Amino acid sequence: MSHLLAFDWSQTEARVATASLRGRRVVVEQAFSLPLEAGATVAEQIGVALAEKGLTRGDALVAAPRTSIEVRQFQLPAAPDEELPEMVRFQAMREFSELGDDWRLDYVPMDNDPTGPRTVLAAAIGPEPIGRLEAACEARGLKARRLVLRPYSAAALLARSRPGRPDEVRLLIDLLADEAELTVVLGQTVIFLRAARLSTLSREANGTAEVGCEGDPPPAACNAADLPDFKALVAEIRRTLAAVQNQWGGRKVDSIVFYGQQISHGELARSIEHCLHMPVTVFDPFEGLTLGRALQGARPEHPGRFGAVLGMLAAELEQTGHAVDFLNPRRPPKPPSQRKRFLWAGVAAAVLVVGWIVYARVERALLASEVQALQQRLSEVSSAAEHADKVLAKAAEIAKWADGEVVWLDQLRSLSEAIPPAEDAILGQVTIGPLQDATVRKMNLPPGAFAGKMELKGAVRKADVAGAMEKKLQSEGRRVVAPKGHTDEAARPYVWRFENMTVIVPKEAPP
């Protein structure tokens, strides 16, 4: 594989490295840093530096800093891995405040059990920084192949060179020029990451610094101008330890690893170990990698800051994969190719066609006779089917009529419940029967909407009694229409004569 270029940046500095694969060895050809100035964009400044070094063609790997990425951890219902991309995208639209359709989103599953709730760490980046980055690469003849999250690449490099125990929790501290990235790893899985701005150590006239831990000043080696404020660094480490313990059910960090060299970070590591009472080691990112001739005699000034770019190069050249890649995010698996199935189907169809032709020529007369018999049978079956369709249609009409038929015993029972007692009312005449179409038209009722009628004539003590009876009759399935009434003093005590007609609505009638 040809050489690859990788770069990342922080607020004030960018780091660039190139490497190639020789046999099974990753050989780092170049590694240098450049200061970033205000005014021009990061991509433009890096592009100018690459042009000066003659690195204007090939593929580029880019590590975005934690501060330019939105990261959220959330839980999803139980689901297999192939369903997670769509579920993560849907949930991220609710979790991220500004996530749009043009944002790049990728995620890392925190567990591998599809039968239980799934925990994922999702990261998103907006379209503007990606557009500027790709434009700057194209202007220099480079093609952006990967855009990864910096802490993941740095952690991958440590796992490659110093793999820990599967249950070991390590805090990886990457000290940059003006900030520190703190990444917590369980085995080889990143479970927590954050970045903190740190000012460089402000020294007094006597060369000592502000008290950093339990009243003891940091050692003289910690007063170097390129190291952060000791007290601020300890405070950020403690915040990270507390956050991990709170989010992961009391789980504690077992050890701390600094990216750097023993000669420059050894005293700082021992001071942190004394302050926090936990093992602290120093890890050189160039450890385990083969250096080219140019690097063997002149390594970069701050090799500890190259963990991310070297991690990207090693993962890409050794094809171990990247946990987060915004240019190639996790997507639902493509449906299986149907090409092979179609090919076999075509072969089978061809065999069938040839066999049919041979068989038709040999058995043509027999087949013709069989076809004629089948056609006659088809005609008989078709006639029987037509007759059956007519019978079914008639049965449907009968069933429809039966559904709309009035049960007069139920109607008479309801009538007896609605009639007032004998001392208040007498019923002189009850006429029941179907409702004629002429009556429907005369009363301006919807055609076919009513199944029957009950005509009532009688007398009550007063008009209110007749009104109450009509209200009881006006229930579901019945409607009282054309009520009439007049006074008849000759029929005391039943002085109010009434007449009405109650129409019965079938079950299937419209309202």
Image: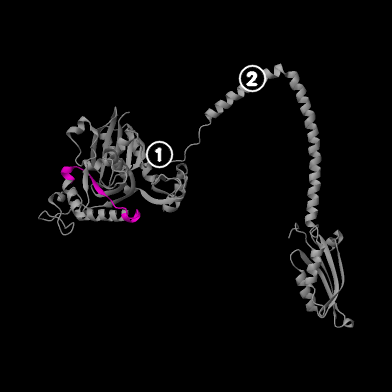
In the depicted view, which residue is nearer to us: 46 or 21?
21
* Secondary structure under the numbered disc 1 in the rendered image: loop
Quarter of the image for residue 372 reads: top right
Which residue is most to the left? 206
What's the residue type where badge 2 is placed?
Val
- Residue 328 is tagged as 1
Magenta span includes 262: yes
Query: Is residue 345 depicted above or below 500 in this figure?
Result: above
Whether the magenta-drawn stretch holds residue 304 is answered as: no
Identify the residue under disc 2. Answer: 354
Q: Is residue 134 visible?
A: yes
Q: Is residue 336 left or right of residue 169?
A: right
**Residue 304, image quadrant:** top left
Estimate the x, y position of residue 367 in percent, counting from the top left: 74, 22
Q: Position of residue 197 (x, y in %)?
A: 26, 52
Residue that lies at the very extreme toward the right in this rendered image? 490
Q: Which residues are magenta?
A: 245-265
* Residue 134 locus on image (x, y percent): 36, 39
What's under tag 1, amino acid-wise?
Asn
Task: Pick the quarter of the image with the C terminus.
Answer: bottom right
